[in-house]
Image: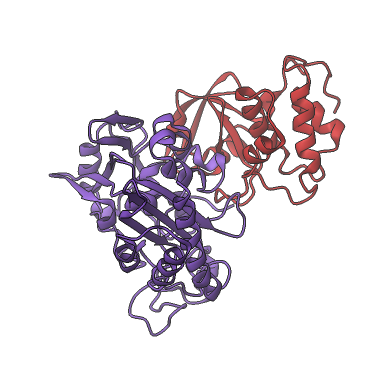
């Protein structure tokens, strides 16, 4: 049986307290755990062996979704099941509810949280293996080894950003609150990520992601499409989130396209976004934008299915997403 | 180091001294000897370790018991009532919905949670609720039929004594 490595466990009541504990126990490689659905498998495979775990499940006021004057606030410990079924989100931000519903399977979504999904570890065929498997290839640079097996001459790790909710929150221009031991800051979700499979989060190790703020939708329509082998359970091997705001006559005033699972961070297709502004979502412009949008996708041969297929599908999925949005 | 935890399992208070890093699956099987809960992938992918926490299915291989103090945990052993089988268990037996049986405890509990909130689910709703429970033998059809059969039965119908 694969067991968790031993650790000491604390369950603070406030995020500030949790952040202080993470800072105080930095030498013990302390980590925070929300739902545990990403961290515990990694700990069982010895990708992480924190001597101290800070459980967030007793944090007060850490769950729930509330509408306010600026939009909606989703607290970090809200489970993906709650996000999926929330009436406010279903009415005003259906793409967020949809992305949450497309994460894994229902039982896991009862445990996994939206804060955890934003901070989910990057994934790679050479990394998401048990200790003995990884040892047999002399490990990889993401954990215990020297080189990247998918791109051996690469100076950096190419593990894949695998959050389904991040791209949707990015196209909706969402922000998140990070509580540290000494300061609280609010950053756009899009600046939470780094193009590096190891150092993929710009969040400090002792910061807790407590809230996600989604601005008023103001007529912005969004969607999310996900590619995977088994529709009931797998991680994304390609995800496309798109959002558009149009004038009354259908002219695009604002466009957002973000690709996920094709790089070590979600990738914003800025050229395609700029291309769409001032245009109408006709078949011609949709195809044109898709042809531009899929270029920044850099899938490598380190997830399920072939990377050439995933790259081709990025173009197809962008077109499908825009076509869906063009129907209103 | 062991810690004393107070859990409630199948309606009974349980005091158990366990290392904190042991998952609920390990504590149920190894300390409480409730081996009806199966261990499969141990990584949250297969669903065979499913138990109910306050009526909702969770993966016991990824749950820490210390976080479950104050909740009600139900395992497959808790499905029977006064020695009589649950309608889902009867339906599974009569439909032939188990072959090797390894996925059955998790599926029974996921199905119980589904019928608790949606007593007359459609085929699609059953498929969605059981999407995270892998079965490598029967091919799912009899499993879906069995849940439909149980849904059609009187939920309070504990009629058949268990024959071992």
Residue A129: image location, x then y, percent: 53, 64
Determine the residue located farthest toward the left in the rendered image.
A182
- The residue nearer to you, when weighing B20 against A199, is A199
Q: Quadrant of residue A9?
A: top left
| Chain letter, purple in picture | A
Residue occupying image coordinates x 34% and y 62%: A276
- Scheme by which the image is coloured: by chain
Where is residue A146, by image quadrant? bottom left
Q: Quadrant of the N terminus of chain B?
A: top left
Is residue B150 rendered to the left or right of residue B111? right
Quadrant in which the C terminus of chain B is drawn? top right
Asked whether residue A119 appears in the rendered view, the answer is no
Vertical placement of B113 versus A7: above or below? above
**Could you tell me which residue is drawn at 52 percent across and 65 percent down?**
A316
The x and y percentages for residue B68 are 46, 30
Along the line of sight, the residue nearer the viewer: B124 or A196:
B124
**Horizontal relation, residue A216 to residue B130: left or right:** left
Residue A301 position, x and y percent, is 51, 75
Does A112 sit above or below residue B152? below
Residue furthest toward the front? A249
Q: Is residue A223 left or right of residue A212?
A: right
Give coordinates of residue B31: x percent, y percent.
58, 35
Chain letter, colour red: B
A242 relative to B85, above or below: below
Residue lying farthest to the bottom in this orientation: A153
Q: Residue at x 47, y 37 (%)?
A: A84
Residue A90 showing in the rendered view: yes
Q: Is residue A161 above or below residue B10?
A: below
């Amino acid at each position: 049986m694969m067991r968790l490595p031993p650790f000491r466990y604390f369950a603070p009541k406030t995020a500030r307290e949790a952040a202080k504990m993470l800072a105080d126990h930095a030498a013990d490689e302390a980590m925070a755990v929300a739902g545990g659905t990403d961290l515990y498998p990694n700990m069982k495979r010895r990708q992480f062996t924190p001597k101290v775990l800070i459980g967030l499940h007793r944090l007060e006021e850490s769950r729930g979704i509330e509408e306010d004057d600026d939009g909606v606030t989703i607290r970090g410990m809200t489970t993906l099941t709650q996000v999926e079924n929330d009436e406010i989100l279903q009415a005003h931000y259906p793409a967020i509810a949809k992305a949450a519903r497309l994460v894994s399977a229902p039982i896991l979504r009862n445990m996994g949280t939206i804060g955890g999904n934003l901070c989910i570890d990057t994934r790679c065929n050479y990394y998401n293996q048990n200790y003995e498997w990884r040892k047999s290839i002399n490990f990889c640079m993401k954990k215990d080894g020297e080189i990247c097996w998918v791109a051996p001459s690469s100076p950096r790790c190419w593990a894949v950003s695998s959050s389904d909710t991040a791209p949707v929150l990015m196209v909706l221009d969402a922000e998140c609150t990070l509580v540290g031991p000494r300061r609280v800051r609010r950053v756009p979700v899009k600046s939470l990520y780094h193009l590096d499979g190891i150092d993929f989060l710009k969040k400090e190790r002792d910061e807790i992601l407590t809230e996600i703020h989604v601005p008023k939708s103001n007529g912005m329509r969004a969607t999310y499409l996900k590619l995977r082998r088994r529709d009931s359970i797998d991680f994304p091997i390609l995800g496309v989130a798109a959002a558009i705001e149009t004038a009354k006559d259908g002219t695009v005033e604002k466009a957002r396209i973000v690709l996920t699972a094709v790089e070590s961070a979600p990738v914003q297709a800025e050229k395609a976004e700029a291309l769409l502004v001032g245009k109408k979502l006709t078949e011609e412009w949709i195809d044109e934008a898709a042809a531009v949008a899929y270029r920044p996708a850099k899938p490598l041969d380190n997830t399920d299915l072939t990377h050439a297929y995933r790259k081709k599908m990025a173009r197809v999925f962008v077109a499908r997403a825009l076509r869906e949005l063009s129907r209103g | 180091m062991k810690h004393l935890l107070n859990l409630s399992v199948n309606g009974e208070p349980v005091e158990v001294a366990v290392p904190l890093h042991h998952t609920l699956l390990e504590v149920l099987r190894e300390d409480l000897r409730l081996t009806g809960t199966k261990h499969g992938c141990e990584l949250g992918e297969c669903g065979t370790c499913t138990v109910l926490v306050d009526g909702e299915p969770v993966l016991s291989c990824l749950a820490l018991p210390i976080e479950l103090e104050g909740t009600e945990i139900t395992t497959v052993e808790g499905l029977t009532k006064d020695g009589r089988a649950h309608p889902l268990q009867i339906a599974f037996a009569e439909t032939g919905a188990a072959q090797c049986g390894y996925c059955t405890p998790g599926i029974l509990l996921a199905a119980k949670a589904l019928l608790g909130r949606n007593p007359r689910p459609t085929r699609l709703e059953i498929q969605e609720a059981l999407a995270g429970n892998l079965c490598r033998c029967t091919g799912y059809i009899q499993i879906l039929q069995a849940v439909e059969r149980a849904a059609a039965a009187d939920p309070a119908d504990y009629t058949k004594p268990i024959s071992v």
